Amino acid sequence: MIRMNRDINEGHHNTEFILVISTANNAEEAKKLAGLIVSEKAAACVSISSPVTSVYRWKNKVETEQEVMLFIKTVQENYKTVERLIRKNHSYEVPEIIALPIISGEEKYLRWISDNTKIEM
């Protein structure tokens, strides 16, 4: 297991790993977003959940809707790219896009994330 800020890969000094969480209106939209994010190498993997029930306040009303959650495994330096791809391709006016730090994880898995999130400049 390695810690978030440990150098695991040459070229990724002090890599900070994050989990970005978002929701989509349905499985089709979730798969579209996941495909775009992974194909752009903005994230190594996007896991898509079964439908969840979300209860939220929107325009002064309490709403209850079925949504699909996306768990996006990436590095901090790619956060803005992930956010841009979600905003540009999402059906919601205000999509959920939040990031949590990954404070530790299995070394080979984190190396795999690092190796698969190299955005070509």
Image: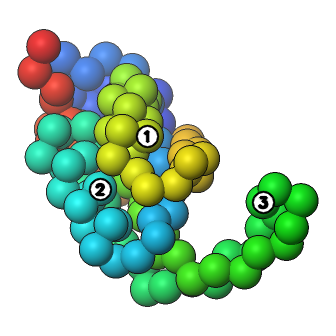
The image's mark for residue 58 is 3
Give SS at disc 2: helix
Q: Tell me which amino acid carries mark 3.
A: Trp
Nearest-to-viewer mark from 3 and 1:
3
Residues under labels 2 and 3: Cα distance?
A: 23 Å
Name the image quarter holding residue 24: bottom left
3 relative to 86 in the view: left or right: right
Q: Which residue is mark 1?
A: 87
Give SS at disc 3: strand
Q: Tell me which amino acid carries mark 2.
A: Leu
Residue depicted at 28% across the width and 74% down the height: 28
Q: Tell me which amino acid carries mark 1.
A: Arg
Q: Position of residue 53 (x, y in %)?
A: 64, 83
Residue at the extreme right of the image, as rendered = 60
| Label 2: how many Cα within 10 Å (few below 14, some 14–19, many 20+) | many
Mark 2–mark 1 CB contact (< 8 Å): no
Residue depicted at 40% across the width and 51% down the height: 90
Quadrant where the image shows the C terminus: top left
| Label 1: how many Cα within 10 Å (few below 14, some 14–19, many 20+) | some
Q: Is residue 47 above or below residue 9?
A: below
In depth, the one of 53 and 1 nearer the eye is: 53
50 relative to 7 in the view: left or right: right
Q: Is residue 51 above or below residue 61?
A: below
| Label 3: how many Cα within 10 Å (few below 14, some 14–19, many 20+) | few
In depth, the one of 118 and 95 nearer the eye is: 95
Disc nearer the start of the sequence (2/1) = 2
Q: Which residue is mark 2?
A: 33
Disc nearer the start of the sequence (2/3) = 2
Q: Position of residue 43 (x, y in %)?
A: 27, 44
Name the image quarter holding residue 55: bottom right
Give SS at disc 1: helix
